[in-house]
Amino acid sequence: MAEAQGGSTDSEEARQVRAFWQRLGVPGLVDVHTHFMPERVLRKVWDYFAANGPLVGGLEWPITYRREEAERTALLREFGVRAFTAMLYPHKPGMARWLNGWAADFARRTPDCLHTATLYPDPDVEAYVGEAVAAGARVFKAHVQVGAYDPADERLQRAWGLLAEARIPVVMHCGSGPAPGKHTGPEPVARVLARHPRLRLIVAHMGTPEYEDFLDLAERHDEVRLDTTMSFTDFTERLAPFPRRALPRLAALGDRILLGSDFPNIPYPYLHQLHALERLGLGTPWLRAVCHDNAARLFGPAGGRTGA
């Protein structure tokens, strides 16, 4: 199957993306890892990628979909993405509450976006997490690498407990790719889960590069899931290949693997993530679950347009 190339038109890539999920027999895609942020924040993120900042691991990382917000949401819809997220995150104290206010407004004007919120070990973290939950947040983003905080920080414990009680999933970038942070890796996450075993944790990027360690956590904790963001793609396989010996474990956890893409911040076409999943050879039922059914079950019909 031919990959969409950089010179392909959006409409041609969209046609191929729609053909992919139509072959699976699902009503569209649910992507749990897409980035929408205040424009000035997102542009700073893009500039950081362009400058090959240390957190990018010195990699050349062109942004394929560097466009205005309205164009990006329209393209996801053209792809047939029925529900997506606004993964946003603070890199310093005092930023999360403001980001959550923006995200709540974005969710109100973007009905197919799952209302996303974030957190940081601020003194008032429990208060603003509670406010976000009361405002209808459906998913949280935690970025341990960029935020450079320990997810098991005592200041976060009541917030994790609140989210566990509310059964709101948390997408956490906690693996050590593309560059390790002071608190990345499975050990800090294991400490969080020891105190909050009911926390609905979604490990971003399959935990790259500590894939098997995070599969261990998922096998031990029924509420741990993993998203596919950038995993199995040519870009990531060159840097941190997924161990083929772990494919049977990936297949066995097929009801807890969720499609994620990192759109728009990806150095290749969106279609390539889908083809990367397909070439794992785990079968149509596995792909159907990963690309739609698992997230539709987790977030329910109230999550964007995930209902049939």
Image (cartoon, helix red, strand yellow):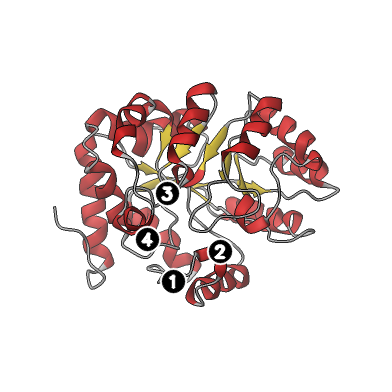
Look at discs 4 and 3 and give the one toward the viewer.
3
User: Which label is found at residue 66?
Assistant: 1
x, y percent for residue 10: 28, 65
Residue 305 in view of the camera: no
Q: Give the mark, 3 or 1, whose residue is nearer the N terminus.
A: 1
x, y percent for residue 239: 37, 57
State the SS at label 3. Answer: loop
Disc 4 marks which residue? 75
Q: Residues within 10 Å of mark 1 (few under 14, many from 20)?
A: some
Q: Residues within 10 Å of mark 3 (few under 14, many from 20)?
A: many
Q: How many marks?
A: 4
Q: Residues within 10 Å of mark 4 (few under 14, many from 20)?
A: some
Q: Is residue 72 left or right of residue 37?
A: left
Look at discs 2 and 1 and give the one toward the viewer.
2
Q: Is residue 22 left or right of residue 144?
A: left
Q: Give the mark, 4 or 3, whose residue is nearer the N terminus.
A: 4
Q: From what the image shows, is residue 226 above or below residue 92?
A: above
User: Which label is found at residue 229?
Assistant: 3
Q: Amino acid at mark 1?
A: Arg
Q: Give the mark, 2 or 4, whose residue is nearer the N terminus.
A: 2
Q: Quadrant of residue 8?
A: bottom left
